[in-house]
Amino acid sequence: MNINLTLFAQAFVFLAFILFTWRFVWPPLMKAVTDRQNRIADGLAAAEKGARSLADASVQTEETLKQARAQAQEILAGANKQATQLVDQAKVQAKSEGDRIVAAAHDEVVREVAKAKETLRKQVGELAVLGAAKILKREVNAQAHADVLSDLAARV
Amino acid sequence: MAAEDHAELVEHAEHAEHALTPASYIGHHLTFLQHPVKPEGGFWTLHMDTLGTSIVLGVLVFGFLAWVARGATSGVPGKRQAFVELCLEFVNEQVRGIFDKSFEFVAPLALTVFVWVLFMNAMDFLPVDIMAKGLAAAGLPEFRLVPTADVNATFALALTVWFLMIGFAIKAKGLGGFVHELYAAPFGLPKLTFNPLTWIGVVLMVCANFLFQMIEYISKPLSHSLRLFGNMYAGEIIFLLLWLWAATGLAGTIMGSILGVGWAIFHILIVALQAFIFMMLTIVYLAMAHEHH
């Protein structure tokens, strides 16, 4: 227990080490630790943000998909409707066309029949004239008896 | 750890002019390497062993810390940096637990105290007789390896902390506040009126407060330093007493070795615990210096 100059020398050494640690050891290590803490905190925050934006994106995707599906449905329905419309329209058109063709054919037939009748009537008239001429054994003047013949043809 | 003791004792016996007694063996191991700065000696003496060991340890350990600190990365730390950061965080947690503000200086101080005292204490694990033999061969016949078993070293640490404590107290409260606390705390002062009784009361309270403060200021460095010194000195003495078993022959050497191992294992706890206590008291004293009464 003899106190001597060692005490002061030791205290001086102690102070030197304190100052050394305070100046050269503590700040860089503490800085590294706090920097890492900040980086980890930032990383965690970023990860959380990423997860949140991923959830947002998936929600948005779902929304867009639903919209697209609805749109496709709409387009499909429209196309169906249009197709039906077209078919109906074509049907109507075809019917009217058919009707028209049938009517025209009918007219033609009527006209042909009339024409045939006319021709027939003429031929019958001529035949009648021919017959009559044969019967009369004499040439009938066709011109002289035209009115009689046409009258006859009209009656046949 | 003790097997060499027998040989060492024989060595002692061969070299010593006088017979090797337990007292001379222990006395030899408890003699400082003294270097008188002035011819009259006395106070003007330096313990070169205490200073040398503590300086070498300090340079090694703080040099290591500074080396790690210089290459410290805020990215993924290596094993070395992770270990140092672990120690740093440990000390920082203690400081943070006691100090809620302005620990910029206290935390490095606490780290210095803890690490340095820990390593100085750990010198107790070196086998004294092997070391003594080696040092004697190197021309240092008397050399004490444990700086903290020198009361000069522990008082140096405690008094430095004590002066820092007073400095912090003055810085925190101002010189006026510091002096005011010397006579107004911990009991307070009665309110001064025209009644002469209150004057007597104030004088009495000032005396009581001042007495208490003085006791506190004197007891702090004493308990701080003597606790560490006492533990380490006792640990050293017990090692030496155990090594004395080697003087009784082979069976005694084996017995002493077994006991020595047991004491060394227990001493690991003491070494770490005393370093920790010394650091905690340092932090507490400096925290108390910041407190306003």
Image (cartoon, coloured by chain):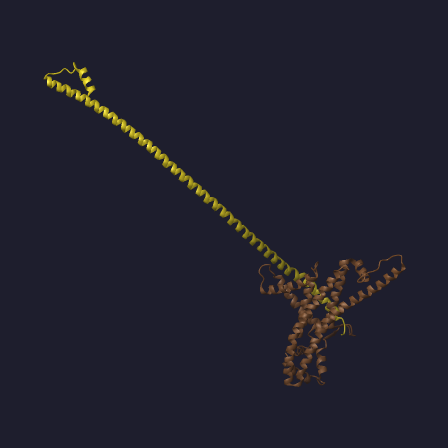
Chain colours: A yellow, B brown
Seen from the viewer's position, the closer of residues A32 and B46 is: A32
Q: Residue furthest top?
A: A144
The percent position of residue B223, horizontal first and vertical second, equals 75, 70
* A94 horizontally vs B65: left or right: left
Task: Please state which of residues A19 and A83 is positioned toward the viewer in this rendering.
Answer: A83
Q: Give the quarter of the figure containing the N terminus of chain A.
A: bottom right
Height in image: A77 above or below B135?
above
Indicate whether B87 appears above or below A58.
below
Q: How many marks?
A: 0
Residue A83 % position (x, y): 38, 38
Please say if B216 is above or below A70. below
State the image quarter where residue B68 is shown. bottom right
Looking at the rendering, which quadrant does residue B106 occupy?
A: bottom right
Residue B12 seen: yes
On the image, the x and y values in percent for residue B166 come to: 76, 62
Q: In the current view of this chain or complex, which residue is farthest to the front? A: A155
Residue B55 can be seen in this image = no
Residue B102, position as x, y percentages in the image: 71, 58
Quarter of the rendering containing residue A151: top left
Residue displayed at 58% across by 63% down: B78
From the viewer's side, name the closer residue of A109 and B227.
A109
If the image is split into quadrants, where does the C terminus of chain A sit? top left
- Say if B40 sits above or below B195 in the image: below
